[in-house]
Amino acid sequence: MISLVVAVLREATPMIYVAMAGMLAQRAGVWNLGLEGLMITGACAGVVITERVGSVLAGVAGAVLFSVLLSVLLWVVIEKLRANPIIAGLGLTGLGLSGTDLAIQAIYGSEAAVTAPAGIPTLGPAYGILGVLDVLVLLMPFTVLALWVLLRRTRFGLRLAACGEHPFAARSVGADPGRMRLLALVLGGVLAGLGGADLSLGGLQIFSINMTAGRGFMAFAAVIFGAAHPLGTTLAVLFFSLVEYLGIKAQLVFGENAPRDFILMLPYLATVLGIWISARLRGGAVVNSAELRDS
């Protein structure tokens, strides 16, 4: 049982950080479909900088920095250039996926995987099976709790929700929707960078092209499934990660008797199922992020 919890936590933690970034953006009125791009950029920057500098801390800091810069770019495109947030987010994802591919080829001359000399510190063998948990996994529950307090118990959280749902009303009481969106996207960039860094520097200590494999989109789906609530979104990611873990175990237990392609599909099928359940529970309502922006 403990091994199940540890495995799910390790798999879910990078997506939880990224999902928290998506949740903050949605609270501000932006459905951020650029999460995949932010995550892959953070994962790439974390490993490359760690490999070049020899410092994991520098790698994590670099992952956060690049993710924040891309988040600011997204804000400029949707706020200043008035682009559709959904299209801009998809463009950011494309930029992240293709940009990291190009960067790896330019730096190393090939698309081969890059290995970091060290990873994010873990608890260590003294803690037994829990020893594989790294620092970001341990900080994850406190991060989710802190975001819950920030969004539900502070003036900032109330203003952020108001700017996302009723921007004109928020402006009438002195809140600037554009500024609040910038703050939400920057804070989300920090979280997405941490998620990307944990993906590449956590257990694997390696970066390969397209290694996120749709995790950013699954994180976005978790935001919808969890109703943009910190706890609900976290539970949604844990559910997706549990399905993936059970799929891997089924493949190990049943071997070739379990169709490999079907096993690989399970997390994405669970994502679609989660979105369907979420829509049914809310009466099938679909919200367009462009409608949340003030014109």
Image (cartoon, grey):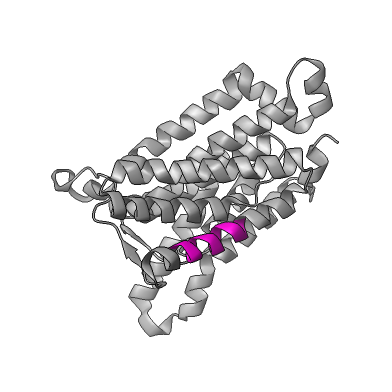
- Note whether residue 22 is visible: no
Q: Position of residue 280 (x, y in %)?
A: 74, 52
Specify whether residue 94 is painted magenta: yes
125 or 198, nearer to the observer: 198
Residue at image position (70%, 51%) is: 88
| Residue 75 vertical placement versus 177 (above, below) | below
Residue pushed farthest top? 173
Q: Is residue 266 above or below residue 196?
A: below
x 69%, y 57%: residue = 276
- Tell me which secondary structure the magenta stretch mostly adopts: helix
Task: Determine the image quadrant of residue 111.
Answer: bottom left
Q: Nearer the viewer, residue 201 or 159?
A: 201
The quarter of the image holding the C terminus is top right
Q: Residue furthest left?
A: 126
Residue 120 lies, in percent from the top left, at: 29, 46
Viewer-proximal residue among 225 and 159: 159
Residue 92, given in percent of the width and then of the height, sits at 62, 54
Locate residue 61 relative to residue 67 in the image: left or right. left
Q: Residue at x 40, y 54 (%)?
A: 199
Q: Is residue 149 above or below residue 91?
A: above
Q: Position of residue 63 (x, y in %)?
A: 43, 46
Residue 18: say if magenta. Answer: no
Q: Nearest the camera: 82 or 138?
A: 82
**Location of residue 157 by image quarter:** top right
The residue lying at 50 percent from left, 65 percent from top is 102
Q: Residue furthest right?
A: 295
Which range is magenta? 93-103
Looking at the image, can residue 217 be seen? yes
Q: How many marks?
A: 0
